[in-house]
Amino acid sequence: MAASCQEHLRRLLLLLAGAITLAYGQGGGFGGYNPPAPICPAFSCPSGQKAVGKPDHKIWSYGCKDAGMNILSAANFDASNPFAGMQGGKSVNKCCIERDICKQTCGMTSKECHETFQKCSAKICKGDQNCNLQAMMSEIMSEPVDTESDKDKDKKYDPDEYKCKGYNRGQKEACMCVPKKEFKAATENNLKSFYSKFNPEKLNKKGEIKDVEEVWKKWKGKEPAMLMALATKYKDKAVEIRVKPKPPPYTPPAYDAREDASKSDETGATADDASEAPDTTQ
């Protein structure tokens, strides 16, 4: 593993340890962890254009199905695979997937996605300590270790940039820009594309949306929320579940005997010089 990748993982683990300590201390358990929503910049378009979802974008998620750590087994934590051995109990996997749906729905804000996850996990956990810990870890470690940082070793680590990484990537993958006057038609095209794949009964024989006027009456001005609600409803078919990349196990740097010998020589030379220095004491 490259040095910058190791440093990134170290910082994540320190962040996790601090969050666990804070949450347990403030809440008398892991139910006290409720971080503020990250404020991430929205996807932007040139003047005269508006962001709309790409009709061919395939929503995907790592989920967090294997996150179910028992507090008593925390001593077995494996830095290279944080969710290893986490089995049983309640699962917030549904919440992780719905959070990723939000991040990949063009027009949803990072605050809305954060609140979506918090509300979902609170509803599932209902004060369960292991479940709350699972939710906390799923928030902190939702993204794999960024090996891309190896390309710019001098780049300063920015925790806010890391918090926005998944949201920024999701919006970039899901959004495109169209002239404002074409926004409504593009949104309808997205709806038709979605229904044709996952619920063709919503389309008439010509492939047009049934009761499209009612759709606009209900959802005009709330188009991102409409598309997110649809993807969430049909998430078992609409969301591709991917395997989260795992960092390689930490490998300590190789021992270099020559470096130690060099340091010893330097220390010895300094001692010899000191012994040969004239005595100026009275």
Image: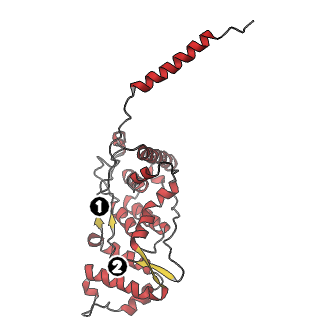
Return the x and y of residue 74 as percentages of the image width and height: 36, 42
Relative to residue 269, is residue 90 drawn left or right? left
Relative to residue 91, is residue 14 drawn left or right? right
Q: Nearer the viewer, residue 7 or 124?
A: 7
Which residue is identified by label 1? 242
Q: Nearer the viewer, residue 119 or 207?
A: 207
Distance of label 2 from label 1 (alpha carbons)? 20 Å
Residue drawn at (29%, 82%) of the image? 195
Say if residue 34 shows up in the picture: no
Graded by Cα atoms within 10 Å as few (under 14), some (14 to 19) or many (20 or more), the crowding at tag 2 reads some
Return the x and y of residue 24 as percentages of the image width and height: 47, 47
The local secondary structure at tag 1 comes to: loop
Q: Quadrant of the N terminus?
A: top left
Q: Nearer the viewer, residue 91 or 159?
A: 159
Examine the image and state in which quarter residue 126 appears.
bottom left
Residue drawn at (49%, 19%) of the image? 265
Which residue is identified by label 2? 55
Say above or below: 163 vs 223: above
Q: Nearer the viewer, residue 223 or 214?
A: 223
Graded by Cα atoms within 10 Å as few (under 14), some (14 to 19) or many (20 or more), the crowding at tag 1 reads few
Say above or below: 3 vs 228: above
Return the x and y of residue 219 as percentages of the image width and height: 43, 84
Amino acid found under the numbered disc labelled 2: Pro
Q: Disc 2 or disc 1, which is closer to the eye?
A: 2
Say if residue 240 shows up in the picture: yes
The local secondary structure at tag 2 comes to: loop
